[in-house]
Image (cartoon, rainbow, N blue to C red):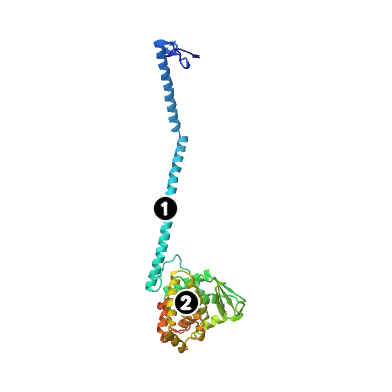
Amino acid sequence: MFVYSPGRNGIRGGGHRRHDTVEHGKPHSCGVGISGCQNQFEGLGWKWERIRKRVAQLKRLFSDSEYTMYFVIFGFYGHMGGILIALFFLLIVLTFAILFFYFFVNILDYFIAELIGHPLRFPIRWKTKKVSLHQSSLLHHYFSFYRRLPPKRKIEFEHRVAHFLEVYEINGRDFTVTEDVRMLVSGTYVMLTFGFRDYLADVFERIIIYPEVYYSNITDQYHKGEFNPAMRAVVFSWADLLEGHSVDNDNLNLGIHEFTHVLHRNAHQERTTTASVFKRHYNNLMQFVKHPHIQRQIVESNYFRDYAFTNEYEFLAVVIEHYYETPLEFRSHFPNLFRKVSRMLNHAHTLQLPENRIQRR
């Protein structure tokens, strides 16, 4: 029940609910005068009590596990957001640190290689690849270079052969590729690059084997072998490749010749430390042989066949054939040139003395 009662200024601005109170066990109503004011104060106290109870209810509400979980989750994701941001910036810093370390190490490696004449060797690798027992026996049969190596270096040679066979394809054209073919091709390349730290070249992808000399539609000539950069292929006649290894003192080795073209091309195309060092030693070698006195001495000696003077590419290939086929004769005729070739190949530690490179069976 609502009633209107006069307020302080005559009329109250609003109604209030009548409240029955108990005083000495007797109910009474709000009225005017002192008794009415007392009842109004008691009404205000009742309203304050309601507010206090409502606040208590809110406290209990927010202390409830369900609502508390909302605040916990919000705080958790807020905390996780901060962690993710920190991890993101940490990842950026680590990326720049790794890049800086990579470029710093490469620059340092290059300057050290320039200083000492060859790249540093890093003997640590994740896994050493192995060849089968049969493949190992073929390497021992075909290569005196391999036979002379100490056991630890033989493991390195076999690792490189296995890696070579994983990276490059060896396909036959009207020819069946056997393990003998695979070992002779891969072993020749590994022997030639054994002084290199970065020994695999990116300028070719496959080796193509013909049974004998083949006709080239590009040159309209018959070839024993070639390196075709456009096709990213090295091509061999198996008969001539095998003959080059069978006869060890004629300074003709088709495998060494064509793979030298590969290394020459790779040195001018790649930016690895090994390629840079090879290129620097090659430039020194060519500058040396272009001296008029050295040129005259080379021509008059008749040690190198005429094909060597076709161009710089063929000269290098022929010189390295001689380096492997007749090293003692090479060194006796041209000791300075021999030393420059040895530095270019980093073969000072594996100088090969004359011995049959292949045993006939």
What residue is pinned by disc 1? 90
Nearest to the eye among marks 1 and 2: give it: 1
Q: What residue type is labelled 1?
A: Leu
Q: What residue type is labelled 2?
A: Leu
The percent coordinates of residue 40 (x first, y second) are 42, 15
Compared across the picture, whether 213 is left or right of 159 comes to: right
The residue at the point 37 percent across, 73 percent down is 116
> Mark 2, residues whose alpha carbon is within 10 Å: few (<14), some, or many (≥20)?
many
- Which quadrant would residue 353 be assigned to in this image? bottom left
Residue 156 shows in the view: yes
- Which quadrant would residue 178 be assigned to in this image? bottom right
**In front of the other: 162 or 17:** 17
Mark 1 vs mark 2, CA separation in Å: 45 Å
Residue 149 shows in the view: no
> Mark 1, residues whose alpha carbon is within 10 Å: few (<14), some, or many (≥20)?
few
- Which quadrant would residue 224 be assigned to in this image? bottom right
The percent coordinates of residue 166 (x first, y second) are 52, 69
| Residue 280, placed above or below residue 48 | below
The percent coordinates of residue 93 (x first, y second) are 41, 55
**In front of the other: 152 or 173:** 173
Task: Give the SS element for disc 2.
Answer: helix
Work out whether mark 1 precedes mark 2 in sequence or the reverse, and give the earlier one. Answer: 1
The percent coordinates of residue 186 (x first, y second) are 51, 74
Compared across the picture, whether 240 is left or right of 276 comes to: right
What residue is pinned by disc 2? 192
